[in-house]
Amino acid sequence: MTISLQARRGAATDAAKTALAWSHTARFLTTATKLDQLPATELPEIAFVGRSNAGKSTAINRLAQQKRLAFASRTPGRTQNINLFEVGPKDAPNALFADLPGYGYAAVERAAKLRWQEVMADYLVLRRGLHGVVLMIDSRLGFTPLDLRLLALLAPRLANGEVRLLALLTKSDKLNRSETQAAVRAAQDVLGDVSTDNADIGVTAFSALSRLGLGDVAQALHSWTHQA
Ligand code: GDP
């Protein structure tokens, strides 16, 4: 397991600047409610997943440097679509970002929860171009049972190195330094359980507000999708 990028603020290095310039090109492509409605594409895809309210939309919008590319849903738990964004040159996109429905919102009725599980399981297990997953974990809450279920679904593809994982400990501006370190260590413990020699799994403190970890995240996604 490769773990723990040393989180830096903003674009601290040339590599981070290049990666952010790339992630800023993200633009809406299409939306779907089921896996079989998504376009079959050869492009490497990176999925953004997490509990509702974990900070997923804000993180995507920060990476894309756009205010409203990903919509923070007005009614949490109601956005059940998979939204795809294209990244790279307009005439030659080289990656896709997939914004998956947030989960875990208590007030969602049972049928919607079951449907979410189905969409999520189908996507994580079957989506062909899936290269990497960015998992949003609220740094003050840590991993919840649904996050662990998602990890278990993904574990076989992580174990053989087919899919990479980066856990973002979001809203880390709300924690002090030692709390942040404790949150990173706790996440490492959880992720250690699904890690193997071939797995590429990382965790980083992140804040869309202070831009902590932003350049590092962009760099990770850029390298995932620009490997030979
Ligand atoms: P989503 O449901 O996962 O898409 O979550 P949102 O991106 O809509 O964020 C949920 C709430 O957390 C909103 O009120 C955001 O303003 C807030 N939030 C998101 N990112 C940060 C952050 O980095 N720091 C702080 N302090 N608040 C954040």
Image (cartoon, grey):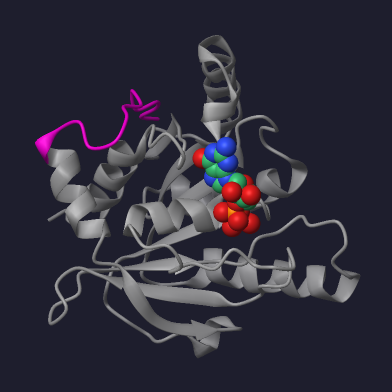
For this orientation, the residue located farthest to the top is 178
Q: Residue at x 73, y 63 (%)?
A: 76
Image: 201 above or below 72:
above
Question: Residue 49, how many percent across, how many down?
Answer: 55, 56
Q: Quadrant of residue 219?
A: top left
In this view of the protein, can residue 152 be seen by the observer? no
Q: Which residues are magenta?
A: 1-14
Q: Quadrant of residue 116?
A: bottom right
* Picture residue at 13% right of the left edge, 78% below the top: 92
The prevailing secondary structure element of the residues shown in magenta is loop
- 109 horizontally vs 30: left or right: right
> Is 36 in the magenta?
no
Residue 11, by quadrant, is top left
Spot occupied by residue 57 in the image (x, y as percentages of width and height): 52, 58
Can you give x and y, in whole percent of width and height, for residue 31 in the image? 50, 83
* In the image, residue 180 above or below residue 167: above
Which quarter of the rendering shows the N terminus? top left
Q: Nearer the viewer, residue 128 or 223?
A: 223
Residue 97 seen from this side: yes
At 61% from the left and 83% from the top, the residue drawn is 33
- The x, y position of residue 110, in whole percent, is 89, 70
- Please name whichever residue, 163 or 31, is drawn nearer the observer in this view of the structure: 31
